[in-house]
Amino acid sequence: MISIQLAESGLKILGRFPVISQLRPHLDQAKFVEQVRYQMKEGYQIAFLQLDEQAVAVAGFRVSTCLASGNFLYIDDLVVDEFKRSHSYGQQLFQWLIEYARNHECKHLSLDSGVQRFAAHRFYLMQRMSITSHHFSMEL
């Protein structure tokens, strides 16, 4: 059975680590819950798609407001377990995020994706997302 829910307890957050670390391999499991809890103070949340008691897709996101977009949902992290891809789990979680955004009066949904992530770009374009800007950064 498939369900999508928010990870709110420390145990639920920690249980998402095996999937999210596939996207963010630099994360330290021992500090993961503490880091997520810190980000939650700034509005970060983790949603996950569960199949038969196993998380197969995870999204880290936040609802925010800015002058350019008004209310928007920003996806920080979106990953499907590498052994469970191509079964529409990512699409189902993405659609859940769209509905969550609409229910929270967001006018936009956005994310950044590394320039090397061609498969992810194909997925986002198939979800009818548009490439609307370039993201610039520098190490300090």
Image (spheres, rainbow, N blue to C red):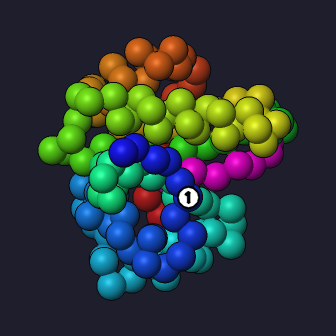
Kind of residue at disc 1: Leu
Q: Quadrant of residue 20?
A: bottom left
Magenta stretch holds residue 61: yes
Mark 1 is surrounded, within 10 Å at the Cα level, by few (under 14), some (14 to 19) or many (20 or more) other residues, namely some
Residue at 49% x, 34% y is 94
Q: Nearer the viewer, residue 114 or 15?
A: 15
Q: Which residue is mark 1?
A: 6
Give x and y (percent) for residue 47: 51, 53
Q: Secondary structure at mark 1?
A: strand
State the quadrant of the N terminus: top left
Side of 68 where 10 appears, left or right: left
Dominant SS of magenta comes to strand
65 w.r.t. 113: above or below: below
Side of 34 where 28 appears, left or right: left
Residue at 59% x, 77% y is 38
Give x and y (percent) for residue 49: 42, 48
99 w.r.t. 39: above or below: above
Q: Which residues are magenta?
A: 59-66
Residue at 38% x, 51% y is 50
Side of 11 where 56 appears, left or right: left
Magenta stretch holds residue 53: no
